[in-house]
């Protein structure tokens, strides 16, 4: 993973070196910024097997974007993106604390959400300045994303009371590839006819499905009925990026 930023930089520098005076139809850009979770992705968790809240907080996002401009203002794109959102550990601990009586101390940890996505798309580019340096690009993309439900663990014990300690751990659960889409708009400022600076705001959404099962009606002596179930994780977020690109 450490080699990826260097690879993107080499591709970017190489592309600038190959650029000719004539305006090209291809463009490559890299950008980074924030990923702001929304909806169920940002909602507080509950202590239930059926919980599908993300408990995510503001994270970081990155994007590599390839574009091809047609003779008119329409174009095609391919974006490779990733985002990392930590979980609200304080809120997670407080929810556990609220379910206990007074006198208990709680420790809780939660790993980060990591979302990777590949999306082809279409865009429309038009100039909004007389010198054609400033362009707006509405864009719509759809593809696949990959993520996993992050690991969580917590422990609690009643203060100064031996034998009351409880520890629970839930490992990471990989989710299958899921359909995703993204809608947004970018603002490109051309420093010259090749190099441009960019800002982009987009809404991303996906709903990967977690299939699981649970026992109903069982106890210590009688086995229960195994019930298959599934839950969707809504990975909604607003992504704001800035970056640099080159046309060739």
Image: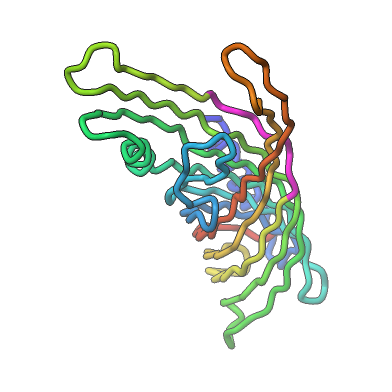
- Left or right: where 145 falls relative to 47: right
- Compared to 183, does 45 lie above or below? above
- Compared to 177, does 15 lie above or below? below
- Left or right: where 77 falls relative to 48: right
> Which quadrant does the C terminus fall into?
bottom right
Magenta segment range? 171-179
Residue 151: say if magenta: no
The quarter of the picture where residue 216 lies is: top right
**Residue name at image x 53 percent, y 23 percent:** 171
**Residue name at image x 73 percent, y 73 percent:** 124
- Compared to 195, does 218 lie above or below? above
- Left or right: where 153 falls relative to 142: left
The image shows residue 217 at horizontal and vertical percentages of 64, 26
**Residue name at image x 77 percent, y 66 percent:** 75
In the depicted view, which residue is nearer to us: 225 or 42? Answer: 225
Residue 173: say if magenta: yes
In the depicted view, which residue is nearer to us: 19 or 125? Answer: 125
- Compared to 101, does 139 lie above or below? below
> Which quadrant does the N terminus fall into?
top right
């Amino acid at each position: 993973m450490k080699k990826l930023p260097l690879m993107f930089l080499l591709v970017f520098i190489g592309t600038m070196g190959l650029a000719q005076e004539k305006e090209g139809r291809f463009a490559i850009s890299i950008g980074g910024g924030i990923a702001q979770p929304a909806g169920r992705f940002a909602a507080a968790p509950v202590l239930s097997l059926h919980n599908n809240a993300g408990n995510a907080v503001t994270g970081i996002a990155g994007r590599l974007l390839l574009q091809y401009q047609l003779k008119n203002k329409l174009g095609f794109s391919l974006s490779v993106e990733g985002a990392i959102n930590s979980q609200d550990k304080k809120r997670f601990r407080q929810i556990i604390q609220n379910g206990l009586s007074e006198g208990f101390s709680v420790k809780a940890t939660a790993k980060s959400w990591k979302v990777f996505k590949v999306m082809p798309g279409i865009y429309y580019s038009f100039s909004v300045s007389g010198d054609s340096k400033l362009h707006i690009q509405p864009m719509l993309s759809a593809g696949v994303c990959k993520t996993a439900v992050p690991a969580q663990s917590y422990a609690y014990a009643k203060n100064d009371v031996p034998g009351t300690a409880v520890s629970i751990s839930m490992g990471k659960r990989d989710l299958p590839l899921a359909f995703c889409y993204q809608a947004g708009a970018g603002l490109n400022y051309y420093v010259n006819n090749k190099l441009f600076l960019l800002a982009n705001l987009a809404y991303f959404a996906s709903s990967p499905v977690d299939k699981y099962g649970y026992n109903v009606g069982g106890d210590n002596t009688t086995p229960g009925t195994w019930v298959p179930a599934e839950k969707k994780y809504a990975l909604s977020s607003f992504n704001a990026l800035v970056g640099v690109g080159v046309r060739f």
